[in-house]
Image (cartoon, rainbow, N blue to C red):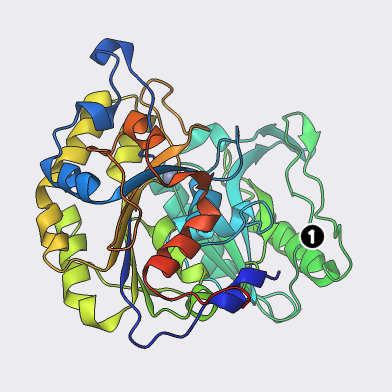
Amino acid sequence: MRYPEDELVVKAPEGEKIVLLIFDGLGDIPHPDFGGKTPLEAAKTPNLDALARDGALGRIIPVAIGITPGSGPAHLGLFGYDPLELEIGRGVLEALGIGVALNAQSLSARANFATMDAKGIITDRRAGRIATEKTIGICKKLQENIGTFEGVKVEIHPAKEHRFVVVFRGEGLADGLSDADPHREGSPLPEVRATKAGAEKAARVINAFLKKGQEILKNDSPANAILLRGLATPPTIPLFPERFKVKSGAIAIYPMYKGLARLVGMDILKVNGEHYEDEFKTYIENYDKYDYFFIHIKGTDSAGEDGDFARKVKVIEEVDRILPILTAKMPAVLAVTGDHSTPALLKSHSWHPVPLLICSKCVSRDSTKRLTELEAVNGTLGMFPSRDLMKILLSNAKRMDKYGA
Ligand code: ZN
């Protein structure tokens, strides 16, 4: 994949610093039970207000107009990639989500235990949703007995309830594989097929793994079969620090966001603690070492998903309260936005544009006073796809060249 405008990115040893502060799922819609306000409108945010008065507002479209994105593609957009072109397999996201490091030689799958009858028919695709502790035990037994297949190592990582992740590591593994999942009960477990040339070895290895796995689990009903979906290798992508010529550090608490940042080549900075304050302190500690920081705040999205308007307001207010820790070392360019909207009213991600604030000396001013969905409509940054944000941030940090004479 080529990004032609990358050729305008200049190596700027004295280039200025960029901070991208992401509130996951920040955007929202008016809630009738809360005076028709959005959480950003309802929250008291004196520090963000000051930045909004100084900076410029706009709105970003995470993936495409009218499309509801997952956090994976939504973050790729923020990192300057086209999420419609750069596909990340479900297995890869699932592995990143539980903190498993992946490289080009790893093929991962979302896995879960299922129940199979004596005739080989899948009778329960979720193995009665066995408890997480039970899954941990069975995964351990599988791991101890599974061995290797054609030199390929197998890693079994338990997740929640009946779910786990399988990572195959070795040479010659390619994706382009059908699922080992009948996708309905009452059918036998299908073998994995190579759907693309080159994936034949992977298909053989996985089928051998499934066969051996079933033998190991034969007395573990209801968890006596393994289903695999979304088998994928990580995409080969031009790495973020090389594309944009910035030394890049990611500050996040949740594994999936660290995983996404690692996937594009950012350094993952160690956060001592689990509070937003600890994330901001990590930024201050590493300020001199990096040109670009990605800082991820998870709480807004979780609250939106739970339909908890008041909690979403609280997360925004809490981050606003501690914002001076971050702005004590104000970067030349500070952008505050979300990866997508997660309206509390909808209890899910949504397609709505996300309000964006950029503070920088050379951003065009506007008359906006607060970072809210409605004010953002009147911002001078306008509305544009998330994947263009990185170019605007680089230009503001004087890291992009002129196009043509
Ligand atoms: Zn998200």
Expressed as whole percent of the image width and height from the top left, the position of residue 269 reads: 30, 72
Give, as a three-letter code, the residue at label 1.
Gly
Picture quadrant where residue 37 is located: top left
Q: Residues within 10 Å of mark 1 (few under 14, many from 20)?
A: some
Picture quadrant where residue 33 is located: top left
In which quadrant is the N terminus drawn?
bottom right
> Residue at image x 51%, y 77%?
401
Expressed as whole percent of the image width and height from the top left, the position of residue 135 reads: 46, 49
- SS for callout 1: loop
Expressed as whole percent of the image width and height from the top left, the position of residue 209 reads: 70, 63
Check disc 1 and report the residue beneath it.
176
Instruction: Tell me: 356 left or right of 187.
Output: left
> Residue at image x 33%, y 17%?
31
Compared with 34, 261 (above or below) is below
> Residue at image x 35%, y 53%?
364
Is 236 or 187 nearer to us in this picture?
236
Instruction: Tell me: 202 left or right of 217.
Output: right
Q: In the image, ligand 1 is in what quadrant? A: top left
Is 111 or 256 nearer to us in this picture?
256
> Residue at image x 61%, y 56%?
91
How many numbered marks does the figure carry? 1
Picture quadrant where residue 87 is located: bottom right
Kindly give the residue lying farthest to the bottom in the view shown. 13
Question: Can residue 140 be seen at all in this image of the molecule?
Answer: no
Question: Can residue 233 be seen at all in this image of the molecule?
Answer: yes
Instruction: Tell me: 209 left or right of 249.
Output: right
Is 69 or 207 nearer to us in this picture?
69
Expressed as whole percent of the image width and height from the top left, the position of residue 168 reads: 63, 69
